[in-house]
Amino acid sequence: MCGIVGYIGHRDASPVLLEGLHRLEYRGYDSAGIAVPHRGRPRVHKAAVRVAELRDRLQTPMPGRIGIAHTRWATHGEATDVNAHPHLDASGRIAVVHNGIIENAEALREQLTGRGVTLVSDTDTEAIAHLIAAALDEGANSSLEDAVRSALGAVDGTYGLVVLDARRPEELVVARNGSPIVLGIGDGEMFIASDLAALVRYTQRVVYLDDGELATVRAGAFQTSSLQANTLQADRAAKTPTTVSLEAEDYELGEFADFMRKEIYEQPEAVRRALRGRLDDRFATTHLGGLNMDARQLREIRRVKFLGCGSAYYAGQIGANLVEELARIPADAEPASEFRYRNPVIDSDTLYVAISQSGETADTLAAVQELQRKGGQVIGVVNAVGSAIARECGRGIFLHAGPEVSVASTKAVTTMSLSFALLGALLGRVRDLSTANGKRLVAGLRALPERIEQILALEEEIAAAAREYAHASHMFFIGRVRGWPVAREGAQKLKEISYIHAEAYQAAELKHGPLALIDETMPSVVIVPDDELFTKNIGTIEQIRARGGPIIAITNAELPADLADTVIRIPGNEPELDPILLGIPLQLFAYHLALKLGRDIDKPRNLAKSVTVE
Ligand code: F6R
């Protein structure tokens, strides 16, 4: 969601803040703003514009070695100049940037209005600025940290926030409850951000704040304490920094025009990294040390449930199929966003798998917390090391996909499915999956990076096919069993970046209703794996053709001549691994269709990366 940046140190703050915002813009991009104090008041520039435009508008220099900045994804209040962050208190002394949602915002706003405070924006955040100012006024000698702690005592909801008191330009106070905040430790300077992307060009030494934590940050030091504690109890300490292996180049476009295509092309390398050290030729199995489970514990698992949101949920469906097929353990996937609301039955023999690229998705994190509360055993399948879900689960499988910046997820989804193949093989080999099948799978997994390279070599062919369908207003994505989650993810990619309505359907369900929609204006992308259901899928294509519907077949099989209008034929592998490969041409299909329509590929409308609000 929103991006937050803070800086205090020996440099001019505004270039650091603007550069940080530029790196974080993928998290939210409907408005941007910056505050740097000057003579006891924050100078604020903010507007409902992209970061590049804010930078262009800042013609006058903003001298100052401390400041905060924000790029927004609107939740409370429209995307307007006045609703952009930072928000100020009435005296114009306190500036706040905030990510998250304050649930009792209306009540707080009413209370403030009752006390004579005039609120100028429609946001929940502005109330926090006024509350902090009031707490400072009440306790004349209190620290900014105490004032923030006291103000947040009245606040229900989620936040990652940074507070600047223009009269104390030697410190910033940050707090976290449900929305990520990370501190970057420099040499006599400190960086604050909602995401490593804004920090790694300056430092690799970072400290992640935990939920319920607060920190006072000065140029040469920081101190954390609990949000709950009162002044006397606050156990102030400095957490030990960890070193991240990310570099600034990981967030650069290089030769690519956008991150989505760059990340599509990073897939062979991402898969190689994700496989490193995890294939065991001797025992024809896989190693997943991060699970911290021995063979006996693996055998005790009676069910597997995958939980994720959006594309991570579709990857979870691929995972459920893989686990059932390879290990013969009942498995299913469920949207994490629904899970906690239905008072789920938690079974101690079930392995719950929380899936998330960012590791910060609020709905998935809440599902994990519900599981922990009820004593379920949950592992995380996460890309972002140090993220909330990774830390909450404490064990699992890291994707090693590298940072994903494009809002439309590609390499993360591929490495999620890959991780589930590794998990399925591991669970299978402690049960009845034969050595021969184990060997076959290990070889198939090892071949994946090369196969992905072969698919990427088909880009021009896929692009030409995509351009042909750019006039369509609706599309079906059809799949059966292994192809079904692939179709769902393909439809998801298309709709989110091209804005074409795309609906995924199970092949056999078509005839139970949706077939009525088929005519020459409704193209169907049909997933046709080279497996035991091949002839069934050909039958589905015939049904669509008989009604005049154009067909784009995505397959690793030899199709009868003239069956489909367009055939994208990719290399084969072991059938169980087909979903991993069949998804890749669909990424390129969506990408080129969106490109043809002139869409803003990395910043699709209404969306943002990392959904840290409910
Ligand atoms: C689609 C997409 C989203 C995410 C979903 C979960 O391309 O990116 O549907 O998959 O918001 O995000 P993570 O994986 O970060 O939990």
Image (cartoon, rainbow, N blue to C red):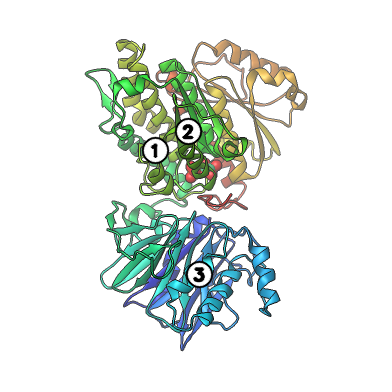
Residue that carries the numbered disc 2 in the rendered image: 584
The one of 60 and 370 positioned closer to us in this rendering: 370
| The label number, if any, that marks residue 150 in the structure image | 3
Q: Which label's residue is closer to the chain start, 2 or 3?
A: 3
x and y percentages locating residue 588 in the rendered image: 51, 38
Residue that carries the numbered disc 1 in the rendered image: 267
Mark 3, ligand 1, within 8 Å: the answer is no
The one of 440 and 597 positioned closer to us in this rendering: 440
In this orientation, does residue 457 appear?
no
x and y percentages locating residue 554 in the rendered image: 54, 25
x and y percentages locating residue 452 in the rendered image: 40, 31
- Between disc 2 and disc 3, the foreground one is 3
> Is disc 2 in contact with disc 1, using a CB cutoff of under 8 Å?
yes
The one of 207 and 286 positioned closer to us in this rendering: 207
Q: What amino acid does circle 2 point to?
A: Ile
**Secondary structure type for disc 1:** helix
Q: Residue furthest front?
A: 232
Which residue does the image show at 58% across and 15% down from the upper left? 561
Q: Which of the 4 quarters of the picture holds residue 29? A: bottom right
Q: What amino acid does circle 1 point to?
A: Gln
